[in-house]
Amino acid sequence: MADPIYRAPKGTHDVLWPESARRRALVGVFADIVEAAGYTEVVPPMFEHVEVFRRLGDATDVVRKEMYEFEDRGGRHIALRPEQTASIVRSFGEHRPTLPWKAWYAGPNFRYERAQKGRFRQFDQVGIEALGPEDPHLDAEVITTAWRFYECLGLRKVTLLVNSLGGPDDRARYVAALHDHFSTDRDALSEDSRATLATNPLRVLDSNRPEDADLIASAPSMLDHLSDEAGTHFDQVKAALTGLEIPFTIEPRLVRGLDYYVRTTFEFTSETFDAAQNAIGGGGRYDGLAEAMGAPPTPGVGFALGVDRTLMVCDAEGAFEAPDAPVDVFVVDTTGGEAALLITDELRRAGIRADRSWDDRSMKAQMRAADRSGAAMAVIVGETERESGTLILRDLRGDAGQESVPCTSITDILLARLK
RNA sequence: GUGGCCGUAGCUCAGUUCGGUUAGAGCACCUGGUUGUGGUCCAGGGGGUCGGGGGUUCAAAUCCCCUCGGUCACCCCA
């Protein structure tokens, strides 16, 4: 074990092949799906002025205690992004694209917190944000897009939870009602929840502490505090999901940790993942966020999906497996290595993935390397071949044996074989 | 940020209870058996500041303290 300084910092890790290839493939699947739905990629910076994230709400833990903040050499107060919705909305206000604006993103986020399974200080998310329309069908489209993504990965044990927090006024009335409810028996709450009650009564509903369970169970339901307008919006979202045959569960206690959500909120959990962090993705409406960022008031809805957690769920379901061999052909050269240099170059230019050995190793060692590379075929050059202008083509997968071919036709033959 | 468990070779681990010869195994890796041919088999080999620092002791992987890292739960989220 190396000196701690030469290890990845706490809560971070290196992603090596084949996991790195799988991760890139997952983002590729995501990109295909969202671009097929008209979303265009946005690549925001990985850090912003701290104020951008402060707009997420001073009561959120993400802002209060998990931000990677620092002052840069120019004296600017900067924070590594803890999520990307804030950056996307800031970008929206800065560039004022025509509405509706449908954006997607993929990349790392940073939160300073204690790492555990499925929770890291640097973690990747993919997501979409749609700004402009208030149409409940847009909520449904956003949710459906995530759902189809999980389907494409081959996941079958994902649960969709939906809720409505109502409009800002409904939300305020509900928070007041919750405050009253919990205050009547305040001493029964856990100490942590009493503190949460003072800053954000909604999130008391999120508590997993056993002593809070009874009061949470008897708490009033958000759904009884929806205005007619918000209720109608929620009904239309549910009807749309039903029409799309997306199964969902209504979860009136689903509040989510970011304070900017209003009306529709949703979360995806995995049945295979009974750890505390079983949320693999989530999102909702944030109709007031653009205005809070100094942009024209613009409704928005979106989601973020955790790449690491999604991949863990893929593991649990045996879905979306890592790709196999990175090369098709392995060139074995016992004449010094220059032939391998030329042949691999020729093959690669023809689009054939090819690798070789180095340091002029023995034929046995090179053949072993060829076998382990996972390549389907070996191309062998020895003295005999060099003299006769031929190459040996050997099957590495089965017992098809080998044959001698003119070296001028090797690329064409391999292109046909590897079809 | 709080608490529990853990940290021995690249990987998975034994050895730690009751300190005591050169710290082991499997897998992986390298070489040879096979004077041109991998995958099976056989033989040999390289590789370890026992996470790090300090302490106790004639003697520490083993006991004590600190620290770093991992893991699980809480908080919270992806």
Image: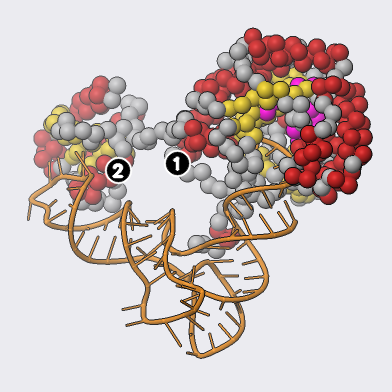
Is residue A207 on the magenta stretch?
A: no
Amino acid tagged 2: Arg
Q: Quadrant of residue A384?
A: top left
Q: Which residue is mark 1?
A: A17
Location of the C terminus of chain A by quadrant is: top left
Q: Name the spot of residue A377 as percent of width and height, x first.
A: 24, 33
Question: How crowded is the residue under tag 1: few (<14 C-alpha within 10 Å), some, or many (20+)?
Answer: few
Q: Please, is residue A225 above or below residue A70 in the view? A: above
Q: Position of residue A100 (x, y in %)?
A: 73, 14
The magenta-colored residue range is: A256-267
Given residues A35 and A218, the one toward you in this image is: A218
Q: Quick check: A331 left or right of B7?
A: left
Task: Look at the numbered discs 1 and 2 and tell me whether their residues touch, using CB distance below 8 Å.
Answer: no
Whether residue A381 is visible here, answered yes or no, is yes
Q: Chain of mark 2?
A: A
Image spot of residue A253 (x, y percent): 76, 30
Mark 1–mark 2 Cα distance, whole angstroms, equals 15 Å
The label number, if any, that marks residue A372 in the structure image: 2
Query: Image point 34% across, 32% down: which residue?
Result: A353
Residue plotted at (85% across, 45% down)? A188
- Crowdedness near tag 2: few (<14), some (14–19) or many (≥20) residues, C-alpha within 10 Å: few
* Residue drawn at (61%, 16%) of the image: A246
Name the quadrant containing residue A404. Answer: top left
Furthest residue in direction top, as rendered:
A243
Specify the subunit that label 1 lies on: A
- Give the SS element for disc 1: loop
